[in-house]
Amino acid sequence: MGRDRKFSTFDLFLCTKKLIIQTGYEGFTIGQLATQLNVSRAAIYKYYQNKDELLLDFMIEEMKNTLKSFSSIPEELPFLEKVNTLLQKIFMYKDLHLILGIQEVIPTKGAPLLEGKKRHLSLMHRELYKPLIHLVQQGKSEGYIEMDLPNDLLLGFIFQSISIPNHSGMDTEKAFFYTKKLILNGILKNK
Amino acid sequence: MGRDRKFSTFDLFLCTKKLIIQTGYEGFTIGQLATQLNVSRAAIYKYYQNKDELLLDFMIEEMKNTLKSFSSIPEELPFLEKVNTLLQKIFMYKDLHLILGIQEVIPTKGAPLLEGKKRHLSLMHRELYKPLIHLVQQGKSEGYIEMDLPNDLLLGFIFQSISIPNHSGMDTEKAFFYTKKLILNGILKNK
DNA sequence: ATTTTTAGTTACACATGTGTCACTTTGGAT
DNA sequence: ATCCAAAGTGACACATGTGTAACTAAAAAT
């Protein structure tokens, strides 16, 4: 029943991603989003009560996809290979880090709906970090990683490094190759 | 002659820094700034034609200070010590990276005044990178750094890593210690 | 064909931010 | 004491964004 939709949720989230990365939370407007989708603003408000709900739903979807991808690392692989595949995945989802930063800025204004979605997000957040922490722990006990490095700093380091702005337009593969090298071995040569 | 000022340029830039880091370009408003300084918005407009001019002036000032600090690295020091002092300085000015990112978002709207200030900024930007590139080059020729690592990626890596969010509230010195370790040697132990 | 259901639009009221201008305040110079 | 120059304020016009409600459009069910 009913008329055909002019835009899919998929399109909507795709545009949302593009815009939120470009402009940040405060700069993001439903107006821009509507223009990109060739619909009126009100059409979007048919599906989301407000901007914040839309953004949170988008983030949850983004998180779901990332989570699915991250949870499929074979447990048996040797440490260095696991690290490699994981870094590759983090590299593919490099925007996630930026997106999750935005989540902290969204005001809930005491609305239970929004508060619930935020809680959901931070739960998934922890879920996402679990395999990473686990891997770091493995690395430490197998002697690959210095014991005294704090886990959260280490993870922060990885996420932060992964999103080095590729301003010079290097091709993605090369960028990943060098980034990985830097994360694993730092800037100094292993003498 | 004339009445005493209620706020100094120093205070103004201090508040500007705080706000721009918190809220980003789009979120930053003259209203917030005025409130923080206990003056009316109009008082601020006495000194700056508009928001963008204020922000650019702030950035130029910030850049000047950083530049002064960076240019005072003794040339004779051995490589590793130079790296250490430089990292320390970058760590102290870790906000600069974020601030410079904002500069790219400021619209000049064809105003020659703003365009001029922007050009000034990007000149200083290059000036700032010069000693860094120089150091990296030295490191490469002295065999400390892998030759094939692209310079800009390497610098991006350093700036990016320096601004790992210290969410767990580690004390600054410790945070710097571990961050340095990660930048220099990566996450893997040197076997 | 006409009714129902869902999608979308136009127009509105409201809120917040910008930049300006006529005005007041205040302190030193005369 | 009064004049004047710099500092600050309140109020306004304008622009942009939010969220809503009454409406129209179109596709499927009857």
Image: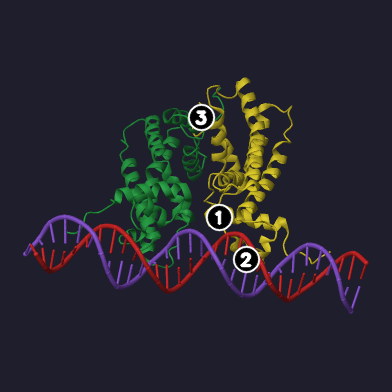
Chain colours: A yellow, B green, C purple, D red
The residue tagged 2 is A35
Q: Chain of mark 1?
A: A
Residue at 35 percent of width and 55 percent of height: B57
Q: Nearer the viewer, mark 3 or mark 1?
A: 1
Q: State whether residue B55 is above or below residue B70.
A: below
Q: State whether residue B75 is above or below residue A114.
A: above
Q: Mark 2 packing: few (<14 Cα in 10 Å), some, or many (20+)?
A: few
**Image location (x, y in percent) of residue A185:** 54, 31
**Image location (x, y in percent) of residue C10:** 64, 75
Instruction: State yes or no: discs 3 and 1 in contact (Cβ < 8 Å).
Output: no
Q: CA distance from mark 3 to mark 1?
A: 33 Å
Left or right: A121 as drawn, with respect to B87: right
Left or right: A66 as drawn, with respect to B64: right
The residue tagged 1 is A22
Give C1 or A151, whichever is nearer the viewer: C1
Q: Amino acid at mark 2?
A: Thr
Residue at 73 percent of width and 59 percent of height: A8
Q: CA distance from mark 1 to mark 2?
A: 15 Å
Left or right: A127 as drawn, with respect to B184: right
Q: Quadrant of the C terminus of chain B?
A: top right
